Amino acid sequence: MDLDLHPIAAFARDLSLRAGDLIRSERDNHRLEVSHKRDVELLTSADLKSEKLINAAIEKTFPDHLILAEEFSPELASDADLEQPLWIIDPIDGTVNYAYGHHQVAISIAFAYGG
C-alpha cells in the first residue's frame, strides 16, 4: 500500500488537539467522574469521551481502517488485522496524572500499516 502520510499526520494532530480541548474542559468544568477498570486501573469519564471523539472521527474519515483503542476496542481479532491500516489510541496517556490535576498527560494517536 502506498500512502501519503502527510494528510494522515495532519488529521491525527488536529484530532489530538480536539481531544485535548475536550479533556481540559472536562476537568476545568468539574465534570470528571473517576472509576476503576479491572478493580485496579484508573478510568475517567474523560477517557471515554476522548476515545469516543477520536474513534468517531477516524471511522468517519477512514471507514476502512481498523482501530485499536484502550477502552472500547483493546484487542484485534487476528494477526492479519495488523496488516491493515491501523490506528492505535490511548485517549489519555497519563490518566493518573490527569485525574490528580497534573499537566503531564497526552493524547496518543498512532497510525500503522503493513504490519
Image (cartoon, helix red, strand yellow):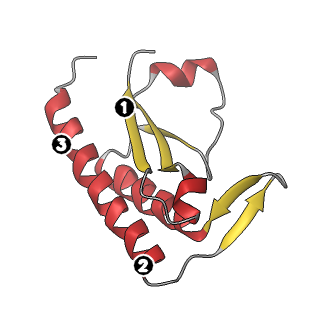
Disc number placed over residue 10 in the picture, else none: 3
What is the secondary structure assignment of the residue under circle 1? strand
What is the secondary structure assignment of the residue under circle 2? helix
Using a 10 Å C-alpha cutoff, classify the residue at mark 2 as few (fewer than 14 neighbours), some (14 to 19) or many (20 or more). Answer: few
Mark with earlier residue (1, 3):
3
Please provide percent x and percent y for residue 66.
Answer: 47, 37
Question: Disc 2 to disc 3, how far (Cα)?
Answer: 27 Å
Mark with earlier residue (2, 3):
3
Residue 39 left/right relative to 106: right
Question: Disc 3 marks which amino acid?
Answer: Ala
51 or 101: nearer the viewer: 101
Image quarter of the N terminus: top left
Which residue appears at 80% of the width and 51% of the height?
A: 40
Q: Which label sits in the foreground, 2 or 3?
A: 2
Which residue appears at 59% of the width and 45% of the height?
A: 70
Question: Disc 2 marks which amino acid?
Answer: Asp
- Which residue is labeled 1 in the image? 111
Question: Disc 1 marks which amino acid?
Answer: Phe
Which residue appears at 54% of the width and 25% of the height?
A: 81
